[in-house]
Image: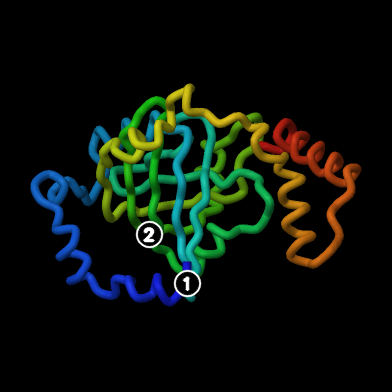
Amino acid sequence: MPEDHLTDWTIRDEATLREMIGRAEGLAAKKSLRRLDRYCRQFIGLSPFPVIGTQSADGRADVSPRGDPAGFVQVLDDQRIAIPERPGNKRLDTLSNILENPAVGLLFMIPGFEETLRINGRATLSRDPHLLERMTIHNRPPKVAILVRVEEAFLHCAKAFKRSNLWDPAARADRKVMPSLGRMILEQVAEAERDSRPDESKVEQIDQAIEESYHTRLY
């Protein structure tokens, strides 16, 4: 489809958007909280998997997952939560963005729940040893924690999860329909650098390194 055709149909202002979609009414308009109530706390305590959205100073957006045993996100009080930063690939997309722009958005998920919890707020990075010690797993505390001061929290309905059948075992895709992570990344890099396709020994080496990291470098 030609790009200019898509541009012709671009929505450029909120007035046009609202005319098409309308405005939130009733509970949808009233449900936003300024602090964490008992249901928000309980939801966070049951969630092993939130995703965090950040943005750099120049507007480059990023969304990144975080995962640990349920309850790993610590509720410090009714307006502050703390998220441990576990070992990763050292890109630091989320942490670097927070240093430039503290505005963050979080989406908490619970396996089997089709509802989610959304939190928006302002984040800072902490190396407080007492806080980090509370987040220790397998005798390994994180080096950094993300502190989020809650500005908005609300529960989100299940429509997206019902449409996607995310938790339905019958809807699961067979992992074999796509190549291994190592192969995909190596081929992407080779294509970007206009290099030859990686040989099979290199693919096997990277796949083994990734699998080893899952067993030895989670914490």
- Residue at 44 percent of width and 55 percent of height: 53
The image position of residue 19, as x and y in percent, is 15, 65
Disc 1 marks a residue whose amino acid type is Pro
> As rendered, which of 46 and 79 lies closer to the eye?
46
The image position of residue 175, as x and y in percent, is 63, 32
Q: Residues within 10 Å of mark 1 (few under 14, many from 20)?
A: few
Element type where label 2 sits in the image: strand
> As rendered, which of 129 and 139 lies closer to the eye?
139
Residue 182 left/right relative to 36: right
- Residue at 55 percent of width and 43 percent of height: 132
- Residue at 22 percent of width and 70 percent of height: 14
What residue is disc 1 on?
A: 2
- Of all residues, the one furthest to the left in this rendering is 26
Disc 2 marks a residue whose amino acid type is Arg
Q: Is residue 136 above or below residue 18?
A: above
The image position of residue 191, as x and y in percent, is 76, 62
Q: Is residue 60 above or below residue 31?
A: below
Give the image quarter of residue 122: bottom left
Q: Which mark is residue 122?
A: 2
Residue 137 left/right relative to 199: left
- Residue at 80 percent of width and 67 percent of height: 194
Q: Residues within 10 Å of mark 2 (few under 14, many from 20)?
A: some
> As rendered, which of 188 and 118 lies closer to the eye?
188
Total labels: the figure holds 2
Closer mark to the observer between disc 1 and disc 2: 1
Q: Is residue 137 above or below residue 132?
A: above
